[in-house]
Image (tube, rainbow, N blue to C red):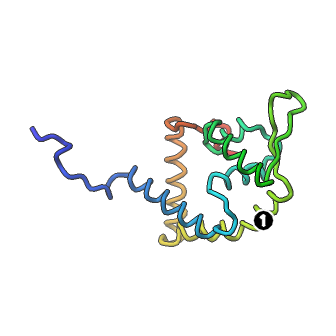
Amino acid sequence: MENPSDSPQDLALLPGHLIRRLQQIAVAIFLEDTAGFGITPVQYAALRWLGNSPGIDQRTLAGKIGLDTSTLGGVVDRLESRGLLVRQPSESDRRVKQLALTPQGHQLLTDMAPHLQASQDRILAPLPPKKQAQFLAMLAELVDKNNVLSRAPIPKESSED
């Protein structure tokens, strides 16, 4: 009986490998197109969410962008030290810190917007427009249907915000 590990496997046929490679490519494009801002994709996600929903707490933000709270803590620390966001005690529970963008954080998002759009366009550029829409729809479906398998699943009510 042949051992499956003895037969060669084409990595180009493995969705996990292709998704990992696309993630590497997407990060490289993002970092290239936004190089002057010194922001990572995860930091951008945190800033963008706070720009859309000011005053949410760190645990909620972690859930919204699919990060564990300890990883997000480091992200928030770095963004706060750069003066892009602030932590403020919640009026209802002093143990909870609410997050909000500073004016510098808002300005950074404004300044980054065209660069971010360029990076997203570059990621999809190899596909014709109709396939871009299909790809995004299928990608969103895969993420949504596999969300529960994530190390930091996005709560169902958050995935539609």
Q: Nearer the viewer, residue 83 or 27?
A: 83
State whether residue 125 is above or below residue 101. below
The residue located at (53%, 36%) in the rendering is: 151
Q: The C terminus lies in which quarter of the figure?
A: top right
Left or right: 41 with respect to 104? left
Residue 3 locus on image (x, y percent): 15, 40
Left or right: 53 with respect to 13? right
Among all residues in the image, which is located at the extreme front? 81
Residue 23 locus on image (x, y percent): 49, 56
Query: What amino acid type should be assigned to the residue bearing mark 1?
Result: Thr
Among all residues in the image, which is located at the extreme right? 91
* SS at badge 1: helix
Residue to which mark 1 is pinned: 110
The residue located at (68%, 40%) in the rendering is: 73
Residue 55 locus on image (x, y percent): 83, 42
Q: Nearer the viewer, residue 156 or 60?
A: 60
